[in-house]
Image (cartoon, helix red, strand yellow):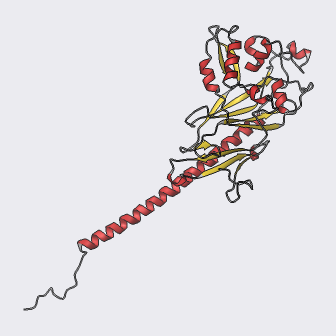
């Protein structure tokens, strides 16, 4: 007797076939997910680069749009000489009013400050982890537009108005503390990125000074690389001192730590200053985004930038010698 099931087609899959399909599906899913991860990582790295460039452009915008008071009464009590540099000059008998008029010195412009905001100092390297970049107001003595400063260049103009980011101010309890002369803001690189110099793996140490000329109001950009100004640490270390007796000590502490803006603006014995008119090259790196490991995008502030257009993403199809990616 014939088996009735002998010629019937077999239905279903064997265990081997099922496992093979599952394995192929898993591999396809893993490849798909890996591709998504790479794309997400690449997008995050791109976003981090663009965000840093936008941060630099915002500093230009804030410098250009700041309302500078060009006249005003120079207040003569110690805590109101605008900056630590101004207080030091006063203590040495060198805070003479310079180009200001008698009316300004006598306070004939009530309701106006004798201090002006001349721009921003972007400070790199104060946070050893690279997580925080600080932005300080650059404050100086206000200048009467009708009585311009006698100066050879913008740096000398800033020196003449005692431009600084620090001040030694009186507290409510009668003591004095080192503080910022104006406001301070912070920026944190996005998506675990870090800002390096052109040497791979080295955090950017230095500062960028984006300021208005006290005379003309034109924007100038100076950069300093390789020297960190430890402003936050100096502020922490100089609190609640005796206002009259410790001013010189505070000034010495700031100078010894190379935290003085004017120190870096002044020429050294060789006629050079730390702040120069040159390109500032920043390398955006991230070792925590898999798809960005080993990559370093170059954001540059062009030599003596005058506006936000000076901040550029450097194309990678040119050599270093041709002005391409320096990273």
Rendered location of residue 64, percent (x, y): 78, 37
Query: Residue at point 66% right, 49% down?
Result: 298
- x then y, percent, for residue 65: 77, 36
Q: Quadrant of residue 84?
A: top right
Viewer-nearest residue: 106 or 225: 225
Occupied quadrant, residue 7: bottom left
Visible in this render: residue 181?
no
Which percent across, then down, holds residue 255? Answer: 70, 22
Q: Residue at x 68, y 60 (%)?
A: 317
204 and 7: which one is in front?
204
Q: Residue furthest bottom?
A: 1
Is 65 situated above or below 242? Answer: below
The N terminus lies in which quarter of the figure? Answer: bottom left
Which of the two residues, 262 or 181, is positioned nearer the viewer here? 262
| Picture layout, residue 124 above or below residue 163 | below
Position of residue 187 relative to residue 69, above or below, is: below
Relative vertical location of residue 204 with respect to residue 180 in this rendering, above or below: below
Report the side of 286 relative to 122 (left or right).
Answer: left
């Amino acid at each position: 007797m014939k088996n009735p099931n002998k010629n019937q087609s077999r239905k279903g899959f064997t265990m081997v076939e099922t496992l093979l399909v599952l394995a192929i599906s898993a591999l396809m899913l893993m490849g798909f997910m890996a591709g998504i991860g790479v794309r997400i990582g690449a997008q995050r790295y791109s976003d981090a680069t663009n965000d840093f460039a936008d941060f630099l452009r915002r500093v230009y915008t804030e410098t250009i749009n700041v309302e500078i008071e060009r006249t005003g009464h120079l207040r003569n009590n110690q805590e109101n000489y605008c900056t630590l540099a101004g207080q030091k000059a006063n203590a040495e008998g060198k805070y003479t009013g310079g180009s200001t008029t008698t009316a300004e010195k006598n306070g004939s412009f009530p309701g106006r400050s004798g201090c002006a905001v001349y721009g921003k100092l972007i400070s790199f390297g104060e946070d050893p982890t690279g997580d925080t970049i600080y932005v300080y107001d650059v404050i100086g003595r206000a200048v009467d537009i009708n009585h311009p400063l006698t100066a050879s260049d913008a740096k000398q103009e800033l020196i003449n108005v005692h431009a600084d980011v620090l001040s030694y101010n009186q507290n409510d309890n009668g003591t004095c503390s080192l503080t910022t002369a104006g406001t301070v803001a912070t920026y944190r690189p996005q998506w675990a990125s870090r800002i390096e110099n052109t040497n791979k793996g080295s955090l950017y140490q230095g500062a960028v000074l984006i300021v208005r000329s006290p005379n003309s109001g034109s924007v100038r950009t100076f950069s300093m690389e390789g020297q960190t100004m430890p402003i936050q640490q100096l502020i922490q270390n100089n609190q609640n001192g005796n206002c009259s007796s410790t001013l010189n000590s505070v000034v010495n502490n700031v100078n010894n730590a190379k935290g003085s803006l004017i120190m870096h603006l002044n020429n050294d014995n060789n006629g050079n200053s730390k702040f120069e008119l040159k390109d500032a090259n920043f390398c955006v790196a991230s070792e925590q985004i898999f798809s960005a490991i080993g990559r370093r995008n170059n954001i540059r502030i062009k030599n003596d930038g005058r506006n936000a257009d000076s901040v550029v993403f450097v194309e990678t199809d040119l050599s270093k010698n041709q002005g391409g990616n320096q990273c």
